Amino acid sequence: MNKLLRTLKRCAAAGAVVLAAVSLQPGSAFAAPTPVVGGTQAAQGEFPWMVRLSMGCGGSLLTQQIVLTAAHCVSGSGNNTSITATAGVVDLQSSSAIKVRSTKVLQAPGYNGKGKDWALIKLAQPINLPTLNIATTTAYNSGTFTIAGWGATREGGSQQRYLRKATVPFVSDASCQQSYGSGLVPGEEICAGYPQGGVDTCQGDSGGPIFRRDNAGAWIQVGIVSWGQGCARPDYPGVYTEVSTFASAIKSAAATL
């Protein structure tokens, strides 16, 4: 009975505002913020487009001045100078870290806490680092994906200083629906994880990318860390915003910023 039906992989900062609608049974509670579970530390420069956001979420450089993240990481659209993006480092405490403030936020139109979990953050100035292309078709929505983030390494754990990474296999919509039922939005979400659990994104990884190599060997983003029940639990894969579904909308929105 006390089953958590929809747990957003939430921003971990104290007091972070999350406007997402969630469905809970009586007595349930959100899992505490945590980074990539079952992963290893990433090498400096391995994923140069990874961004850490000050509200406790992750993100990726869509362009050198726009970060792609999750809608549930932000509190709406409009001018916003309260977010700091940290980039260019694996170690968040490194003196080499690039820190840039936000100027505007655009949350996915129609976002109400279920599906459409994407947002854009415009930065005050460009960051001179590689960007991460987004998938525009479903061609790469299968196979083995890489996940990365500064979230905790176990459910209920604390945020991490160093970027971590792991790999997880694609989980079909049919299989994912066996776990989440009507909580899943198959046309807007993609699932990944192992049946036995043990490897997953977790709270604090929200908004970060799930990605793989394209046919040319370049990294391409197929999803955005969105939600799941707990972290790395058996038979409960991670759920990610399906980027290809929203690629056109994301690019059009970025052009307005």
Image (cartoon, grey):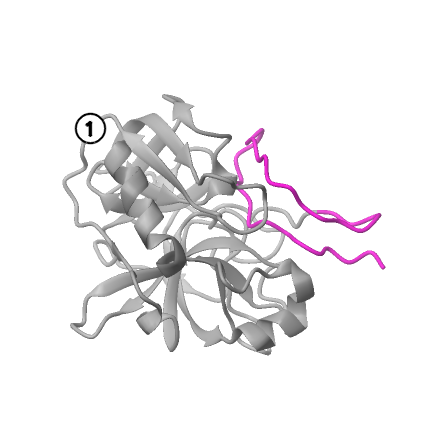
| The N terminus sits in image quarter | bottom right
Callout 1: SS: loop
Q: Residue at x 39, y 75 (%)?
A: 142
Q: Is residue 183 left or right of residue 244?
A: right
Q: Whole-percent x and y of residue 106?
A: 39, 33
Residue located beneath label 1 in the image? 125
Which residue type does callout 1 highlight?
A: Gln
* Image quadrant where residue 170 sits: bottom left
Q: Whole-percent x and y of residue 72?
A: 52, 41
Circle count: 1
Q: Does residue 166 appear in this view?
A: yes
Q: Whole-percent x and y of residue 184?
A: 60, 61
Q: Residue at x 84, y 48 (%)?
A: 26
Magenta range: 1-29
Question: Which of these two is toward me, 15 or 182?
Answer: 182
Question: Which of these two is toward me, 23 or 11?
Answer: 23
The answer to whether 40 is drawn above or below residue 74 in the figure is: below
Question: Which of these two is toward me, 12 or 109?
Answer: 109
